Amino acid sequence: MTGSNIHLIKMLDNNKSERQILFPHLAKESETMFVVLDQELKIVQINDSAAKAAASIVGSSPKPGDLIVDYILPRFVPLLKRDIQRCLKGEVIKRFNKIGTGAEEHIFSYRLLSLDLHPKKLVTLEAVRMPSSEMMPVAIEEQKSYLSNIFNTISTGIKISDAKGKIITVNKAYQEMTGLSEEDFQGKTILHTLPEDEKEMAIEQLADFVLKDIPPKRNWRMLHKDGHEMSIDLAISKVRVGGEYKIIYSITDLSKQKGLEQNLENAKAQMDALVNNLSLMLWSVDENLCFVTANKAAKDYFKRYLGYDFVPGDLLTQVFDATDVPRAEKRKQRYLEVLRTKKTQSFEAVESFRGALQHLSGEMHPILEGNQVRGISCFMEDDTKAFLRSTFSKGLGNFIVHCAKASSIKQVLTHLVEDVLTKLFIEEGEVLLLKEGKLKPIVRYKEGKVKKRLLKSETFVVKPGEGVTGKVAQSGKTLIVADSATDPRVLNIEKAFASEIAVPLKVREEVFAVINCESQSKGFFGEIYREILEAAAREAGEQIRKLQDAATIQEMELHYKTILTSTPNSILLIGKDQQILAYNKRAGTDLPQYGGQKELKPGMSYIHFVREEDREAFNAAVSRALEGRVFVGEREIYHPLAGKVWVQVTFAPAYNKLEEIFGVTLIIKNITKAKHSEKLILDQNYALKKANRELDNFVYSISHDVRAPLSSIQGLSGLIEMAKTLDESLEYNHFIKESAEKLDHLIHNILDYSRNKRKQNQPEKINPRGLVRQVLDSNRYHEGFPGIDFQLDLPSTPIFFDPFRIRLILDNAISNAIKYHDPKKKKRWVKIKMENVEKEFHIIVEDNGQGIKEELQKKVFDMFVTANRQSKGNGIGMYIMRETVNFLEGNINVSSKFGAGTKIHITLPTPKAHAHIADR
Amino acid sequence: MLILLIDDNPIDLLVNDKVLRNINPHLEVERKLSGVEAIDYLSKLSSQDQAPAYILLDIKMPIMNGFEFLEEFEALSPSITEGVKVIMVSSSIDPSDRQKAEASTWVYDFLEKPLNVSKIKDCPVLDI
């Protein structure tokens, strides 16, 4: 396995773990704020959106390791700490707190949930920023300004404290009453303006009011800055803001009762105006559950959604949905419980009045007079948007967690529907995949459940440009249809839905799919759905992109693996301490055979697969590779199946991500064929060199041998010039003829030689006796021929050979026997024997001539070797003879004793056998 | 003056003999067909006056070639070999033959066959 491949696999692993452990990493660009905290409230990870928000509060960006409490508003700290403690105990906290940041009036709603993805228990804080413009419509801004005006123009003194009595703010009237400025109240409690003897009672009564809703006494004494005491009338109420109670004290200076009633009138009118301008719905009922009062917002709500015109004195139960009896009864019981227990109750409800989804939350407070319940005051607010955002955030979190395990695009889209779409109170929804220019539904749900069967039976296909989804696929922009009955873009109005939204799902900026949601109610999909669905589409697009990237990496990995598997070479990766880390398929089958019967397994030491005699060299090569050098070695080894094989082993350093050598890659290649070719080339080279050498000798020798008779002729012609008599001239002329004949014979020999090289083997029937007679006849002019006794032992049956070649062999053998006769011996003989023995034909020519010196016997067949220059002939006769025998695939053997004689034994395969070989 | 001719080719012996005696009819010429015969002849000489002044030696001969002859010749009694000038006569154009001849202390010159009157007259060593 190569180094780069290792890197690839590690990369994959790292990606996966990061995704699983710190999933908000994926929400890096999400508008939702994500902060992962440890138990000491230190930031482990924070996304850009959250970092930006924190920076806007504190002025510097938080970093991992910082304490979260340094980055949030101080008054939010105790609540957050409490929530996190609860969260660590396993509780999932939801909260919709609005936290103003002062100057900028940023408002956040935040949600906490605990996750056990990391061994260390971590808490993920998720928060959604709500732009002030959305949360604070102009009307509220105006209301705030009215409130502030009323607060400061009203003649009644008002101070507001927290549940522990710490003063938050005081109005102008109160400042005038006490002679103190606003600054004087900073950090002070309500006790600040009380005389000493009233302080203890004030604390007790405040606690009773906060905890038990027991209102305090009305008549109190109060101190002015200059020390004089006043008698005051106190009205007290509490308001829940940001999860905590705020206490509002209305103080009237009884000593200045003059004009009080007028003031009260004014205050009441102003209060009415204020109450009626609030978007918060307020109403109250008496102890018989009959309406007493309601503000404008409440009246509008009753009218709009319930069709009820508010009339004081009407039974509250009129506004309950008469068609849903159990629910109406449940609500009634809740009111009765407040009357009974005298305790405040909070409620939360998801309503779908006339098609519009609403999330409502509010509180019911008992109206107490002393210990008597006189009625219930209620307030309710519509926090649908915050609720939807929060629901979406939770769903998106689950979606991201599920996507980490998704292995197909369909799974991602199914998770998108299950985790996000079905949680958004949408009646019907589907995801259509854009494929080959057409939109096809891939996941669909109805009534909160994914409907698989619905898709299988359907062949519904939309072309881009057609209908709402088709237009979205083409333009890449979200479309909202408020009323499908009137909107010309809607393709199929027979379908029973009234409104629709289609959002493009883009992967790498290209439309990949379209999310389409429908509702039975007109105008169901507002901007909040656009915001949420677009955010969902962005996240899904990102998840699909990651999946595709991972698939690309997996494909690449597969390709690498294929390369490794398909190579005919064994490839192994070994670690520093000799253990085998990885190997390819070939190594798995080949190595156990090279190294004995042991099965190859990762973790084994490679030394088992190296022969003992090679271990030292092998270890040295590994050490060199670990130092960063590539080493290539060759060895001939024994393979139990293939026999002797040559292997080439490459030792290359393997690098990790940090470019450090962590092991050695071994590539074992069978180079037996290459080695054989190499040997063949060496042999051929040797043969070529030999041929070259012979050619050199041939040139020198042939020039000498041709020149020798020529120079004789030249010398003789010189003698003829000098000759004085005709007889003398004739004698020289005779020698000229003799020399010319010798030259001619030599030329014939050379021709024979070249003919033997080129001529095809053409066997014919030959009479051996006739053949020998012809050969002897052609040699009769050799010196010494007449004195030699030729003893013949020849078969009478014909033989079957190429006549040219058999004659050439015989001629050379016999002429040598004649040429090298021993003139000193009185009886000179040459024995010529031929016989057929089984499939072999033997020719034996033996003489009692001069014989060949032992050291020359080996060289007699070489062409024109210097050592062979004793040859009386031309020096190529024996060479040609051997070449011819070789051509006929026979054997020639020369045995000789210097001074005693020579025996030439030629064995040739018989023609039939020979022809068979030739055919082959 | 005695000149010993050694050559396996009787024709060349005849030619060389005739050419030499054409220049100096009073020359004594001894012809030998092989090195073996020549060594045999030389070894039987009894005194230096009988030794040849020049030996004209062929290189390429069967049984004993010119160089092998020189080895045997060196082994002979100095009383015979002293003062003898050997001149190689060959039709070989192999440069290795010529180098070998020049390397030998006995060889005074190298003449290429065929010998003729002008070649012998031009030879600085052969003074007949």
Image (cartoon, coloured by chain):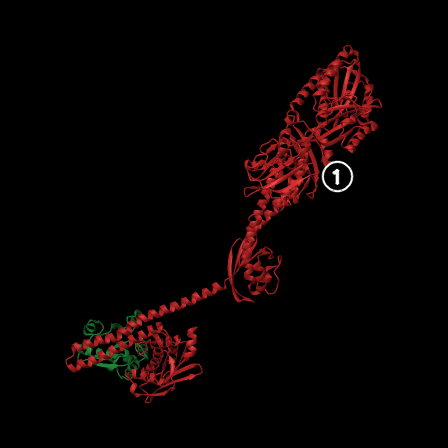
Chain colours: A red, B green
Left or right placement of residue B79 versus residue A117 in this view:
left
Is A326 positioned to the left or the right of A471 in the image? right
Give how far across and how far down residue A169 sits, in percent: 72, 21
Query: Residue A252 in the image: x percent, y percent?
Result: 77, 15
Quadrant, the C terminus of chain A: bottom left
Which is more toward the observer, A422 or A682? A422
Image quadrant in which you'd find residue B126: bottom left
> In the orientation shown, which residue stands out farthest toward the left?
A724
Q: Is residue A304 visible?
A: yes
Residue furthest to the bottom in view is A827
Along the line of sight, the residue nearer the viewer: A382 or A238: A382
Where residue B112 appears, as percent x and y from the top left, is: 25, 72
Pick the residue in front: A428 or A892. A428
Mark 1 residue type: Lys
Q: Which residue matches tag 1?
A: A89
Q: In this rendering, is residue A753 above or below A584?
A: below
Above or below, comparing residue A756 to residue A362 in the picture: below
Mark 1 element type: loop
> Which image quadrant is residue A32 in?
top right
The chain letter for the residue carrying disc 1 is: A
Judge left or right: residue A317 versus residue B66.
right
Q: Looking at the picture, how far across and down is residue A463, in whole percent? A: 56, 40
Residue at 18%, 81% in the rendered image: A730
Q: Is residue A18 in view from this perspective? A: no
